[in-house]
Amino acid sequence: MKTLKRQFVIIDNNWLRLKLTESILNEANGKTNKKQILLENDEIKISFRSTDIANLFLKIITHTQENYFYTIIDVLHDMENWEFKYIRSVNPTYDSHLKDRFTDLDLLEKHIMLYEHTENVIDEAIELTKDLEFGIKSIVIFLALIHDFGKADKVSNVVAFKQGERHDVLSAKYMRLKLKQNMETDSIEKDHIIALYNILSNHHSKEGREINYIANIFYQADINARKKEVKKAKEKEGL
């Protein structure tokens, strides 16, 4: 077995410094490659299999507060294990709310996978919140990461659901579970979890967005991402 390693030092924000090591293990028969991305310092050791997931992690923690740190790691491991890159980001069952805004749902369903859409919404959230207070920015970006987990079939393995339940509600239930599991390490208060649940579970509701401006910012990031995705999908089709 041969191991190839590349090392980098990541200093992307004022509260965390991590060394990144990328290892590729080549099996003796030359047919199997196993990649490991290790981010570590004296106290923390985080491992991912995907360079994309590791880079997404670094992007997110650059723009969020410490109190989501271990929940973000947990969520990204699920994203990796549930293979978001192969899950369609548009499902006619879940996305009827998009019909009023977009006539090209079939193109989105064909060309845009859930991982790409999630990262696109995160990028739009970063842009929309660049001049806002850091705590608000953290919430919007955290919600952007987790907002469509309800579209993954495997979410039903970890949260209770009712037949026909909306994907935003399933996503909110998943988020609540992950935050509760990491309450001690992330120092999350119960009231904060309830507030985030209410925002995420109602962000497709006009009334919900009118009540909470964070939901409105987050919803706009989602719509902005979809507009760019429609353009990209049309280019792929030669339209």
Image (cartoon, rainbow, N blue to C red):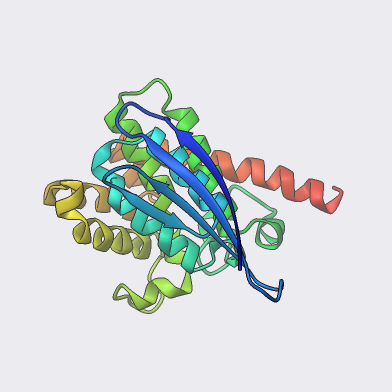
Q: Picture coordinates of residue 142 (x, y %)?
A: 36, 44
Does residue 143 lie above or below 8 as drawn? below
Residue 202 visible in the shown view: no
**Hey, which quadrant is residue 108 in on the image?**
bottom right
Q: Is residue 46 left or right of residue 92?
A: left
Residue 95 seen from this side:
yes
Above/below status of 59 relative to 129: below
Which residue is the extreme one toward the right? 238
Residue 102 screen position, x and y as percent:
64, 49
At 39% from the left and 33% from the top, the residue drawn is: 63
Q: How many marks?
A: 0
The residue lying furthest to the top in this view is 131
Q: Quadrant of the N terminus?
A: bottom right
Quarter of the figure with residue 15: top left
Q: Residue at x 15, y 46 (%)?
A: 187
Q: Is residue 32 left or right of residue 168?
A: right
Residue 129 place in picture, x, y as percent: 41, 28
Say which of 42 and 49 sits in front: 42
Of residues 172 and 165, the one drawn nearer to the viewer in this rendering: 172
> Residue 89: x, y in percent?
57, 60
Residue at x 42%, y 47% (from the top left corner): 39
**Residue 178 vs residue 171: left or right?**
left
